[in-house]
């Protein structure tokens, strides 16, 4: 098994998705600088909304979320009545 706390992808229509996982192994979690570095390395700087990126990193739901500027419907949303719990460090 490969531990990848952060995944970044672009689909065929140009939408950019960011997936951030909480650091359940207390090894190397993903934070905002990691996400920004991955976006920069992929050459996607102008194709993401930084406020969406910041929100996705803070939530760390572990599911792909659309971070393209002005996305249509959200790729993922919490279940009705679900409570967001901020990620905590070691």
Image: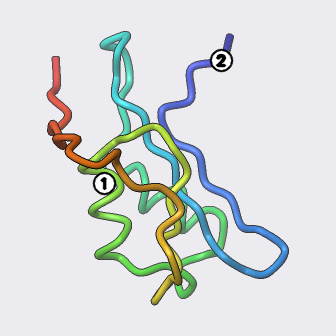
Q: Quadrant of the N terminus?
A: top right
**Which residue position holds label 1?**
32
Please tell me whether mark 1 sits on a helix, a strand or a loop. helix
Q: Nearer the viewer, residue 87 or 89?
A: 87
Q: Is residue 89 left or right of residue 46?
A: left
Find the distance from the CA under tag 1 to the CA under tag 2: 21 Å
**Image point 35% across, 15% down: which residue?**
24
Residue 53 image point, x, y percent: 37, 66
Residue 27 image point, x, y percent: 36, 15
**Image point 40% across, 49% down: which residue?**
34
**Image point 44% across, 43% down: which residue?**
20
Q: Classify 50 as above or below 24.
A: below
For residue 16, which quarter of the picture?
A: bottom right
Q: Is residue 6 left or right of residue 77?
A: right
Neighbour tally class for label 2: few under 14, some 14-19, many 20 plus, Cα within 10 Å: few
Q: Quadrant of the C terminus?
A: top left
Residue 51 image point, x, y percent: 29, 75
Q: Classify 33 as above or below 53.
A: above
**Image point 47% across, 69% down: which residue?**
74
For residue 4, which quarter of the picture?
A: top right
**Which residue position holds label 2?**
2
């Amino acid at each position: 098994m490969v531990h990848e706390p952060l995944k970044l992808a672009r689909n065929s229509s140009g939408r950019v998705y960011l997936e951030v996982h909480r650091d359940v192994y207390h090894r190397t979690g993903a934070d905002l600088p990691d996400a920004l570095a991955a976006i920069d390395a992929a050459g996607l700087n102008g194709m993401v909304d930084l406020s969406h990126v910041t929100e996705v990193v803070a939530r760390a739901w572990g599911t792909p979320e659309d971070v393209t500027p002005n996305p249509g419907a959200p790729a993922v949303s919490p279940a009705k009545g679900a409570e967001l719990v901020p990620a905590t460090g070691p």
